Image: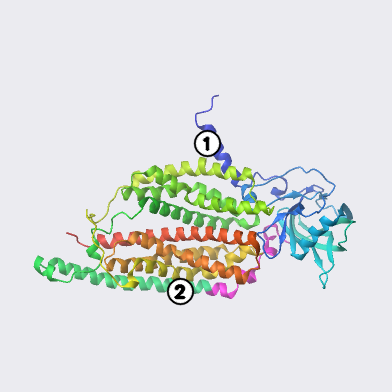
Amino acid sequence: MRPLPGVPGVAAAAALLLLLLPRARADEHEHTYQDKEEVVLWMNTVGPYHNRQETYKYFSLPFCVGSKKSISHYHETLGEALQGVELEFSGLDIKFKDDVMPATYCEIDLDKEKRDAFVYAIKNHYWYQMYIDDLPIWGIVGEADENGEDYYLWTYKKLEIGFNGNRIVDVNLTSEGKVKLVPNTKIQMSYSVKWKKSDVKFEDRFDKYLDPSFFQHRIHWFSIFNSFMMVIFLVGLVSMILMRTLRKDYARYSKEEEMDDMDRDLGDEYGWKQVHGDVFRPSSHPLIFSSLIGSGCQIFAVSLIVIIVAMIEDLYTERGSMLSTAIFVYAATSPVNGYFGGSLYARQGGRRWIKQMFIGAFLIPAMVCGTAFFINFIAIYYHASRAIPFGTMVAVCCICFFVILPLNLVGTILGRNLSGQPNFPCRVNAVPRPIPEKKWFMEPAVIVCLGGILPFGSIFIEMYFIFTSFWAYKIYYVYGFMMLVLVILCIVTVCVTIVCTYFLLNAEDYRWQWTSFLSAASTAIYVYMYSFYYYFFKTKMYGLFQTSFYFGYMAVFSTALGIMCGAIGYMGTSAFVRKIYTNVKID
């Protein structure tokens, strides 16, 4: 049977998307074992305790490998590769429910070079991470004496594995066998395995890694309550002020309609009605503006979907699953970007829609990949596990060209055809109206700077918990809080931008599109400024690699947050502007 034209391309795209999800579950991924079945101890990474993001391959230190050479399976997802998960087989022979008495599994021939490597790791408080049945285990490389003159390596790994039925529910590591590092000696590495029955349910086995006392602290609940009260206050304030003020404006404008031409000319005309002929004028740089709005809508959709999935599926229990899900959802929601960006560009009279589609499709991926590739060069220089393999980079580029771009094209065509016709309640004048002088605090630049303060105030406590979970040894699992904070952020952002836009239009300045977007997006500036405070006062990072990694990815996070907030602010403000000008009688 002959394949249909185009099917190979579709199949390739589908295969790339499947790479984003955990592969077919087999062996340890089924999390069920038969007695004496192979259990794999994976060695992951090693790195300084003060920065969990600076990691290196476990065997970059001169550790030795066990005698077992082959295993029955291996796996790695795209999310794991992008996060620097470097799973390497330990060489230890472990079987389900089969105890192992203390035994030597390899020997290190410690020359001066190897000793210096271990000494450097001990001085910098290096920890290593291992996995058994997807359960993480941490151990310390060694320790120094009180004077810091002699250094000791832990040589004995004592593993205690808890099982419930045919599932592994608990793993504990005890490091023993402290041996002084002396050049030109041989160090024997040993291990033992003790299996014990446990009452822990398989569904609850990750509870020991969570920190309820940290994430459910009273200050966390207080910040949510405080933000919720801010929402009530802002919504009430916007409703009361704008509705009362707009009612007076409508009454004044209706009174003016009843005047004759001479009385109207002698009257003092002012306010937002005066710019009705320019308020729906296309924004400056409509191509970039519409691309930003489309990208912001897509980021919001991705954030909403990923948070919901995380609340349902407990994504923190699988390595790289959060990043894999985010990439998959981002690729799948590309039509959202194309629809909102393409329709807005068409309504503003844009003609280079193909160029707009390309910019909208690649705006966020180019920003993320550009930053990642820059940091990747530094990671390669330091031989860090964060260095992204070439094959992974090719896979990401293929996803952009063969998945994101076609789906964005579909969304753009739908947006242009379904909602691409301008249907403004007021006609646009041929000649732009001159913008009168106004007080300094009504200038768009000032409004933009002040617009992000309240949205940032509603989320900055949550930023602390998110930063701590990413840059420190905390697993973020309270996605219900994150969902509530996202809703609060959206409401506060819309309320603030509506108020800002009303004051701007009342000053007879019709440049509200960029002002509403940037005033909401300025939240990202305050988030990035907060990241400086967090870096210097809450972390112990130092050096080129750690600094560039931190501030590079914080810039990506802040920019994406700003684009999302800007799109939310613009969409809410656009509905408000359309509403008020629909209800005014225009000659």
The amino acid on which the numbered mark 2 sits, given as a three-letter code, is Met
Residue, x 56% and y 43% (percent of image)? 17
Q: Quadrant of residue 238?
A: bottom left
Point out the image quarter for the N terminus: top right
Of mark 2 and mark 1, the one earlier in the sequence is 1
Distance from disc 2 to disc 1, alpha carbons, whole Å, reads 49 Å
Is-magenta flag for residue 220?
Answer: yes
Residue 428 drawn at (x, y percent): 24, 54
Q: Quadrant of residue 455?
A: bottom left
Callout 2: helix, strand or loop?
helix
Residue 83 drawn at (x, y percent): 63, 53
Q: Viewer-proximal residue, 526 or 332?
A: 526
Please tell me whether residue 272 is drawn above or below residue 103 in the rendered image: below
Please tell me whether residue 509 is drawn above or below residue 404 in the rendered image: below
Q: Quadrant of residue 466?
A: bottom right
Callout 1: helix, strand or loop?
helix
Residue 495 drawn at (x, y percent): 38, 67
Quickly name the residue at label 2.
229
Please tell me whether residue 465 is drawn above or below residue 413 in the rendered image: below
> Which region of the structure is painted magenta?
200-222
Neighbor class of circle 1 (other Cα within 10 Å; few <14, some 14-19, many 20+) is few
The amino acid on which the numbered mark 1 sits, given as a three-letter code, is Val
Q: Viewer-proximal residue, 552 or 32?
A: 552
Is-magenta flag for residue 42?
Answer: no
Which numbered tag is attached to residue 509? none
Question: In the displayed structure, does residue 461 sit left or right of residue 337?
Answer: right
Residue, x 38% and y 50% (percent of image)? 287
Quickly name the residue at label 1.
10
What kind of secondary structure does the magenta stretch mostly adopt?
Answer: helix
